[in-house]
Amino acid sequence: MASSTMKAVAVFPKTRELKLIEHEEPRITRPTEVKLRMLDVGVCGTDKEICAFEYGVPPDGSEYLIIGHEALGEVIEVGPAVTTVAVGDLVVPMVRRPCPHEECRPCRYGRQDFCRTGDFSERGIKGQHGFMAELVVDDAVYMNVVPPELRDVAVLVEPSTIAAKALFQTLKILQRLPWFDSSQLREREPGGRAYRALVLGAGAVGFLGALALQTIGFETYVYDRKPAPNPKADLVQAIGAHYVSEQTTQDFAHLLGDVDFVYEAVGAAHLAFRAMQVLGPNSIFVFTGVPALGAGQEVDIDAIMRNAVLKNQVILGTVNAGKADFQSAIAALGKFVQRWPETTRALITGRYPLDAYRDMLLGRPGGIKNVLSFETSIRTDNPKSLK
Ligand SMILES: [Zn+2]
Ligand SMILES: [Zn+2]
């Protein structure tokens, strides 16, 4: 039987090219696998960095890597041993796959997001082809079913898992405080102080983090570069959060020493370490961005260390996400859509056809989240989104 091919977007690191290619159609070869027809694939900074050849590793023996890791697909075929998903289901696949080492307990436990050896692979990033292809085959264990009513926003699930994991860890850490009870987040005693969160960056990861923080009851501040008024500030205000920017330092003054949680989502080290100055007693700082290595920066490390000790602070990094985080991201997205339907949908800036991949990956399309859609042949801008 002659094998047929499908279209996919791939990078060729050796020749530094980005191309639309014909790739052999994947087939189910194991009883636990499923086949997906891809619907939407989101583009983020990681994809752009792969397309700039800053990283991205093709699978062994391949000269190219099919990119794409923020995906939504529809199940079109299942292996005989698959019981958790069915044909017709909408699914968001997980990105990271476990390392092969027997002694790596996180991977053996199914939590490869905590892999100790670094030999994990990631679809569309490191050692395995990604999802920017017409068809994908993968094990059912990595599939997360999404309710049909989230079809138009489900491509936001994968970037939402970053906040889901960070907040799960944060709530665990807050429980070190014997008086902490998560209901206090929402139900404040009369005259009581709210738990305050500062989100650094109003991109997709930051914004989805802000939505999650507002949902669980933090008083949320979102920092971004541009002074208000601007469209991002409007979105922040639409969810009841406060927008702060560099230019309006008075916005920051009252936060000094009084923030319980900082959620860093820009990958800019200088800004992040400066923001540590707003951390209050018993607070938590979570890094999610990955800065490029570069010039040394000057920050007051004595003050940061002093505060960390004297104020019982926790400074935490987080990457990737586990199955439970995907499940809670799906549930959270359902809540966002119910509570802020227009704002949540406005995070998707536009849907591009496959042919427009170069503009999306090499250009600067702007907005918050641009999506490559396998179901459109013309570019469709979201009329409600930011430009
Ligand atoms: Zn991404
Ligand atoms: Zn591992």
Image (cartoon, helix red, strand yellow):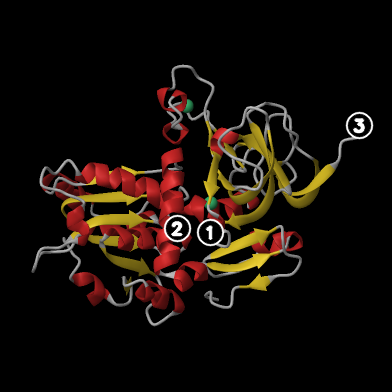
Whether residue 214 appears in this view of the structure is: yes
- Comes first in the chain, label 1 or label 2: 1
The quadrant of the image that shows the C terminus is bottom right
* 229 up-or-down from 150: above or below: below
Q: Residue furthest right?
A: 2
Q: Position of residue 41 (x, y in %)?
A: 62, 54
Q: Residue furthest top?
A: 102
Q: Disc 3 residue type?
A: Met
The residue located at (46%, 23%) in the rendering is 108
Nearest the viewer among 373 and 368 is 373
Q: Are marks 1 and 2 in contact (CB under 8 Å)?
A: yes
Q: Are marks 3 and 1 in contact (CB under 8 Å)?
A: no
Label 3 secondary element: loop
- 10 Å crowding of disc 2: few (<14), some (14-19), many (20+): many
Read off the residue under disc 1: 150
- 10 Å crowding of disc 3: few (<14), some (14-19), many (20+): few
The residue located at (58%, 33%) in the rendering is 83
Q: Position of residue 85 (x, y in %)?
A: 59, 39
Dot label at residue 1: 3
| Number of marks drawn | 3
Label 2 secondary element: helix
* 154 up-or-down from 76: above or below: below
- Does ligand 1 reach within 8 Å of label 3's beta carbon? no
Left or right of 308: which side holds 209? right
